[in-house]
Image: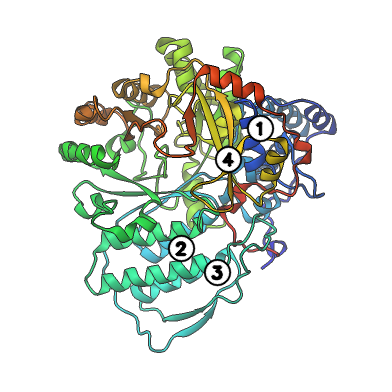
Amino acid sequence: MQDSENEIMISERFELKQQIIDMLQQRTPAFGFGGFGEATYYRTYSRRKEDGSQEHWADTVIRVMNGVMSVRKQHYVNSRLHWDEGYWQAYAAEMASAMFEMKWLPPGRGLWAMGTEYVYTRGGAALNNCGAVDTADLSAAADWTMDMLMCGVGVGFNTAWDGANVALPDKSRPVPFVIPDSREGWVASVRLLIESYTKGGAWFKFDYDSIRPAGSSIKGFGGTASGPEPLSTLHRRIESYLDAYCSGETETTRCTADIFNAIGACVVAGNVRRSAEIALGSADDGSFLELKDYERYPERAEIGWMSNNTVVLEKTEDFAKLPMIAKHIIANGEPGIMNLINVQKYARYGKESDDQAWLANPCSEIPLESYELCNLAEVFPSRCAEENDFFKVLEYATFYASTVALMPTHRSETNAIVVRNRRIGVSLSGVADMLDDLGATELTRRLRKGYKIVRSINRKLASDAGVPPSIRVTTIKPSGTISQLAGVSSGMHFPTFQYALRRMRVGNDSAVCRVLKAAGIPHEPDVYSENTTVFEFPIDQGKTRKATEVSAWEQFAFLAMLQREWSDNMVSCTVYFDPESEAHQVEHMLAQFAPVIKSVSMLPHSETGAYKQMPYEGISKETYDEKLAAMPRIDWRLFSDSDGIESRFCSNDSCEI
């Protein structure tokens, strides 16, 4: 199937005026962390333009602004609402300027996909960060999960499948099935395989010959094909898991987790594409708690890493399990916890507001219903010179996320929930920087005022668009490459080091590898992965306290404050503890804070230099100054023929080779 054969969802196109485009293209962006933020942008988000040239930062800003305004314009036209072109041109110009300065940014998904023909023709799924699914209907849940993972959505799943009415299929007379070379074809093959066990469906002999070979270029979504092998491996794995269940060798929790972890591993396809999952289970489920015991289940090591595992505290009696949960956390850093009572009763903690969500996205910043999606946007207060500038930028981030929530996806079951909830997440990054710079009292005041602004803007935008306001509007996401572009600490977390070597891994055949090598950026072969080079950048993460200087108790208190004052969704937080001095207090911390937060995970601090080529390696200020002085300039005008690594979320979409 060609992209041109798909229904066009966005036919009304908005285009920034040429004078605004010229103004943006004459400016020089100020990426964070020296050359590392800029290199991260070009590696990850710069795309080929229609004329074959490569995007630079202004081009990406223009694409995103044209895209988000086109989505809102299409909604206004469809709803027969008045569209004031002059007003929106002026608004878009100011919003684009703030984005160019990285005062706010869309999430990585939006930075890469917004404004592309793929989104215009295929819907908004690829713009959403967060999704979740209930597994009671195993084949339907697997279908949706694989589809969304291949669109780049992180997916949470529970272990609700009860295993009823499952039987071994008759494999003696298989029905031929030629798998179409499309995302839909891959997804359909997985659904049919599971239904042969759960719904008495036919047993299929899959033919992979139509799937394009590894390395083929994909037009439409972008990226390179991985070939049929990841899908073939997934089919073999699912068959073995369901055969084992039917023969009584395993039970429902293990079978469910195996299937969904294997789906994620297929989408990742040997680190060619990205994917993320979270598994949600009961504290009473011993099988769930042992899923990552690889000494007991060594065969799970090849797929179990795909998901973070979190226990859901559904009733007050579940809190009696905290001592047992603490023991698991001290042993291997899992499980995380999710307080469902608070999720469903409160928006910000202490502010009662019902929410039907009972699941979560992979990083636990967004509670979700089954088949629900949520999109995010991010604000960087430290990039805002004045307090009022910060509040104005919150408006732009709210506009972006609220507008994405207007766009339907290609899944009707998802659209039915999105139009009811319109859930969004306006996030802050560099919050630890704010805490150490402003102090807790001033930070609390700004968060309270900022929340009111986000809620007010969302209500106005919803009223103007003729839709209900979003059920939830704020969050703290973990951030990642986006915070690296802006040069701030990620989410609410404290930096690992002030001065560090920040390493970047890229494939030897990639365009960014050629440019970085030509510039003379320090590099060496990856000791863990073939055909990969590791580059080193010295970075200064500012005066914010290092993570090792902040006690686990203070991190918990900070999390509770953000849940109380800012996030009406959840706060993505990993509390790091000293395994020597704080491990014995983990149960006490959970007992103190679990009743007043919505979610948390915990990990012990790891030793500096614990393994070669770590992403971050702490260095002295003297070493930093020396390496910074020796860093060459990179001529990004030489960069071309790249579509970013985010394209590899989906390397087998329906599109023309």
Q: Which mark is residue 38?
A: 1
Q: 23 or 355: nearer the eye?
A: 23
Q: Position of residue 132 (x, y in %)?
A: 42, 50
Please, is residue 465 above or below residue 246 in the view?
above
| Earlier-in-chain disc, 2 versus 1 | 1
The span from disc 1 to disc 3 (Cα, nearest Å) is 34 Å
The mark nearer the N terminus, 3 or 4, is: 4
- Which picture quadrant has residue 295? bottom left
Name the amino acid, label 4.
Gly
User: Mark 1 is on which residue type?
Assistant: Glu
User: Under tag 4, what secondary structure?
Assistant: helix
Q: What residue did someone put label 4 on?
A: 108
Kind of residue at disc 2? Asp
Q: Residues within 10 Å of mark 1 (few under 14, many from 20)?
A: many
Task: Please identify, in this view, whether the residue under mark 2 or under mark 1 is nearer the observer.
Answer: 1
Q: Which residue is mark 3?
A: 228
Crowdedness near tag 3: few (<14), some (14–19) or many (≥20) residues, C-alpha within 10 Å: many
With respect to residue 493, does 1 lie above or below? below
Q: CA distance from mark 3 to mark 4?
A: 27 Å
Q: CA distance from mark 3 to mark 2?
A: 18 Å
Can you see residue 652? yes
Q: CA distance from mark 4 to mark 1?
A: 14 Å
Q: Which residue is mark 2?
A: 143
| Three-letter code, disc 3 | Pro
Residue 148, compared with residue 198, is above or below; it is: above
The earlier-in-sequence mark between 4 and 1 is 1
Q: Position of residue 473 (x, y in %)?
A: 48, 33
